[in-house]
Image (cartoon, rainbow, N blue to C red):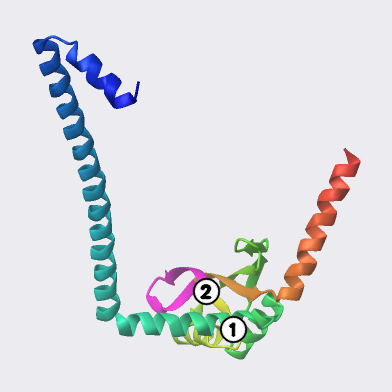
Amino acid sequence: MKLFERIEYIYDNFSDREQRMVVASVLILLVFIASFFVFLVSGSFSEREERVRELRSAARLLEQNRESVEESRQALASFEMKASKKPPMLQGHLDELAKTFELGNASFTPKKSEELGPNREYQMESVEVKFFDVDLKKITQFMDKLEKGPNLIMVTELRITTRRNQHDHLDPTLVVSSYYKRSAAELKELAKKVTKGKKGKGKKK
């Protein structure tokens, strides 16, 4: 007996009440399936519309801030170019620059170097510099000269104490940092050293 004939035979053997219940159940199931597909389709379109709205909003923001975005891009490119140049020894460079601007005796405290970036592609060296009784104009010129040089060197922290009754004379403390972006060859060599170090530790265990 074929499937549909069997279903028809079973259906005919039902009472009128049972037949009505079967028909109602099938209709409810069909309505449920149709509603479920409508829900999936409408949800998909809603997500797509939301993405389109977000993209349009981002495009408007970019258009409105086009000049700022371009300036940021140029600044980033300038930073990348500076970072690719090997910086001088930071403490000696700061000492020489301080003498150029006649900033008197300075106290230098080197900080621990840091590796930045997911692949340790950037190396940051920092030195804390303390000046005593310096002229406001001279310390400003010092910082300008420092940050406008060919290397990526900048003041990352600045604390200033003014002298009583001499507001143009300061006791500033600066943290100056230099950044260097390693080349592909240097990164490869660094990765080899790290691998060797891990193997050596494994053997000792």
Q: What residue lies at 34% left-to-right and 25% top-to-bottom?
A: 2
Marker disc for residue 110: none
- Find the residue positioned furthest to the right: 203
Q: Crowdedness of circle 1 by 10 Å Cα count: few (<14), some, many (20+)?
A: some
Q: Amino acid at mark 1?
A: Lys
Quarter holding residue 50 = bottom left
Describe the element under mark 2 as helix, strand or loop.
strand
Residues drawn in magenta: 155-171
Image position, residue 158 (x, y; %): 48, 69
Q: Nearer the viewer, residue 138 or 121?
A: 121
Q: Secondary structure at mark 1?
A: helix
Vertical comparison of 27 with 107: above or below: above
Q: Check if residue 71 falls in the magenta segment.
A: no
Front-lying residue, 116 or 178: 116
Residue 19 seen in this snapshot: yes
Front residue of 127 and 182: 182
**Amino acid type for the residue under numbered disc 2:** Val
| Residue that mark 1 sits on | 82
Residue 124, given in percent of the width and then of the height, sits at 63, 68
Disc 2: which residue: 155
Main SS of the magenta part reads: strand
Q: Is residue 8 rendered to the left or right of residue 80? A: left
| CA distance separating discs 1 and 2 | 15 Å
